[in-house]
Image (spheres, grey):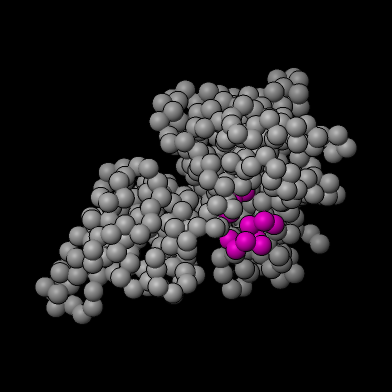
Amino acid sequence: MTLPADGSDDASDASPTRIQRSADDRLDNAVDIGRPVGNHTRELFVSCETGDALQQQLDYLRPSYIALHDIACRSARRLLHAIASASGRPVERLVIRRQSYGTVLASIDYVDCPASRGQRVRLYSTDSESDTATRVSLARVLGAHATLAIILVGDVPAHALSDALQPLREAMFRTDWRCTHLQFMPLASSNHAALAGLVAALGPGSGVVSQIAPRVSRPAEAWTFLSESWNRLQATLHPNGTGALLGTVSLGRDTLLAMPELDTVPAALAARAHPIERFALEAHALPGVQSACVFDVATSRVVAHAGAAFQASDLARRGSLLLAAGSSSRRQLHLTGQADEVLVGGGSEALGVRALHSQPGLALHLVYDPGQTSWTQLRPRLMAMDAALPRAPVL
């Protein structure tokens, strides 16, 4: 099967992917995945399984990039956004849609970091916005085809580390695995020694160079080890000095240092949390979100909270006031119904308050960075998460 190279709409229906050539494309071979649709977004229409479609694209294009991957944490996408902010580059998004129907199957965040001689180095987060099976499939494909994979490891007990690494271990011995360099970054110091032993055992027989950094807690530390690993690899791959070398992001160094610590909460812990607590954790993990608070609208009681940027009690109280003001305005304008969503924009933070339809009497108050995301992007995710909540009485 031949993949169309001109991005035309008359491609055969049997073609599962569409490769687009554009003056704006930034990969080394001037070809990028999907079609640019504005607002730092590209769209890829597929007619086969999402992971298979992405793999066909990467097999065809053979791009050089860095994959940021999580094990037992949700920090890769947060790190990607921090690097984008510090380097002054936008977070871009690849949206994968079902051909003919246009249904969104997955969204993948990435950033093109400035490098030496005007070149750019792409970083992908493997933590895509998709269902679980699709997210696992896309993460495996992105990791398998990366030039360098950065593995962020959460606070996993030493005895459970081997099981946590097993999916990666199995992927490395698949025939489609091409990544030859892994850089592990533990986010907790408690499991560093055990992780170091497991990382050393990954190399023999796999042909993959696996290294481990000291514990990292902030994006600035992660960037230091990431850029050093990439630059060493470039020196090996391009001994003539033509490799794309990453700098120190000196202009954004203070931004990286000021960023909050990377999340070390194990995914298993989030899974065991109360559904409303898990809902708050997942809302806080969305791109650009700084704090998430679920509260009782009538009493301003905090039900669940995630994020250290703002006090939970303040978010609950202000959220109740905003919804009350919205409902009052509707009554004064002779509009029926209560306000169930209020947005407040301005400055470098925006507020979004939304009633939870699955939990009558409760609402969510989000603080987010409008430079990294928008309510238009957040709202569908929040609606889906709300709909997935059990309707049993809460706490």
Q: Is residue 230 visible?
A: no
Magenta span: 126-137
* Residue 280 sits in quarter: bottom left
365 or 302: nearer the viewer:
302
Judge left or right: residue 98 versus residue 255. right
Judge left or right: residue 32 versus residue 372. right
Residue 339 percent across, percent down from the top left: 25, 70
User: Residue 136 lies in magenta, yes or no?
Assistant: yes
Tell me the quarter of the image containing the N terminus.
bottom right
Identify which residue is drawn at 23% across, 74% down. 338
Residue 93 percent across, percent down from the top left: 53, 51
Residue lying farthest left? Answer: 332
Above or below residue 65? Residue 302 is below
Identify which residue is drawn at 47% across, 61% down. 274
Identify which residue is drawn at 52% across, 32% down. 217
User: Residue 99 lies in magenta, yes or no?
Assistant: no
Above or below residue 45? Residue 79 is above
Residue 23 percent across, percent down from the top left: 57, 45
Q: Can residue 287 be seen in this view?
A: yes
Judge left or right: residue 323 versus residue 380. left
Residue lying farthest right? Answer: 205
58 or 176: nearer the viewer:
176
Residue 157 percent across, percent down from the top left: 64, 42
Identify which residue is drawn at 31% across, 57% down. 302
34 or 257: nearer the viewer:
257
